[in-house]
Image (spheres, rainbow, N blue to C red):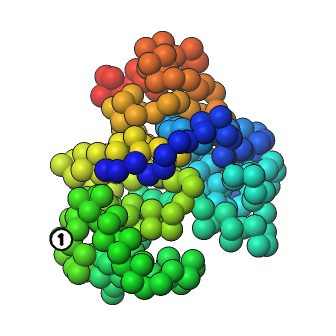
């Protein structure tokens, strides 16, 4: 996969979330969560189910509203109004389910948003879509419909669709959790190549091998808070927080 972006200034803070608070009725899903991500950084978020991982990542493009705190993406404050649409153009997201339009071909799924939202010429949008399908290894599937593709292929289409909007940040919310085991690696390999190409990525996942190999930083959530973060070599070898040690111990003994 060719480099996504050259000459990345990795000192630039592209995602700055401060003191995020989110509740569902009386349940505190996020409690004073702060996280800063620099350009080109790959941050992997892990933790037990219900710890707030997916809720947090969904606040970064306001798929989930939040009651307290602030979020800035590439210097733009995330709030209702024009800035929200600006940020959503710059932040790509890949979900657990593929969310492809079943009545459109693979190519049409990828070209729709660039043409409608960014006003890109149909010919240019199609060329970009075909290039992206080659990048994710399924160019031969361009004229097929999602129902004829495997789960792994559909998720790679979803990644290509997000990339077609030329995002500055990519969010992944457990992108392999809905896949059969034999399809997981084909999606993870695309994500690894994307990380190596310089894309800023925030990934919620249970794939610890991916976190060890690709992450610049691992962030551990528990009960709506970030309780530990660090380089994967340090985090996996010697976590300092009791909950992180227990979590990793359960994984190793599973």
Where residue 138 appears, as percent x and y from the top left, is: 22, 64
Residue 96: quarter of image: bottom left
Q: Which quarter of the rendered picture does the C terminus lie within?
A: top left
| Residue reaching furthest to the front | 7
Kindly state the secondary structure of the residue where label 1 is placed: helix
Can residue 26 be seen in the rendering of this structure? no
Left or right side of 231 for 176: left
Q: Residue at x 40, y 34 (%)?
A: 214
Number of numbered markers? 1
Residue 194 in picture, x, y percent from top left: 39, 48
Q: Please give left or right for residue 159 compared with residue 82 in the image.
A: left
Residue 122, placed above or below residue 155: below
| CA neighbours of label 1 inside 10 A, class few (<14), some (14 to 19), many (20+) | few
Q: Using the rendered image of the protein, determine whether residue 198 is visible from the camera's viewpoint.
A: yes
Q: From the viewer's perspective, is residue 239 above or below residue 210? A: above
Would you identify the image quadrant in which residue 95 lies? bottom left
Q: Position of residue 68 (x, y in %)?
A: 81, 50
Residue bearing the label numbered 1: 140
On the picture, is 151 further left or further right than 250? left
| Residue at figure coordinates x 38%, y 71% from the top left | 128
Residue placed at 18% from the left, 49% from the top?
Answer: 182
Residue found at x 36% / y 78% = 126
Question: Residue 123 placed where, x, y %?
Answer: 39, 83
């Amino acid at each position: 996969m060719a480099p996504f972006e050259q000459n990345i200034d990795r000192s630039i803070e592209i995602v700055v979330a401060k003191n995020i608070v989110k509740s569902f009725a009386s349940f505190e899903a996020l409690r004073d969560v702060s996280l800063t991500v620099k350009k080109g950084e790959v941050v992997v978020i892990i933790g037990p189910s219900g710890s707030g991982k997916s809720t947090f990542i969904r606040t970064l493009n306001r798929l989930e509203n939040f009651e307290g705190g602030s979020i800035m993406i590439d210097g733009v404050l995330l709030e209702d109004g024009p800035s929200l649409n600006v940020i959503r153009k710059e932040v790509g997201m890949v979900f657990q389910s593929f969310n492809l339009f079943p009545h459109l071909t693979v190519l049409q799924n990828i070209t729709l948003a660039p043409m409608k939202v960014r006003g890109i010429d149909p010919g240019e949008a199609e060329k970009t879509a075909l290039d992206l399908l080659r990048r994710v290894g399924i160019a031969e599937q361009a004229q097929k419909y999602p129902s004829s593709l495997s789960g792994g292929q559909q998720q790679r289409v979803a990644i290509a669709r997000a990339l077609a909007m030329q995002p500055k940040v990519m969010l992944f919310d457990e992108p392999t959790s809905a896949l059969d085991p034999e399809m997981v690696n084909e999606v993870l390999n695309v994500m690894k190549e994307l990380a190596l190409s310089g894309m800023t990525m925030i990934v919620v996942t249970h794939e610890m091998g991916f976190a060890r190999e690709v992450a610049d930083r691992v962030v551990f959530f528990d009960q709506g808070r970030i309780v530990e973060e660090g380089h994967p070599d340090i985090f996996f070898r010697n976590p300092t927080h009791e909950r992180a040690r227990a979590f990793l111990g359960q994984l190793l003994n599973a």
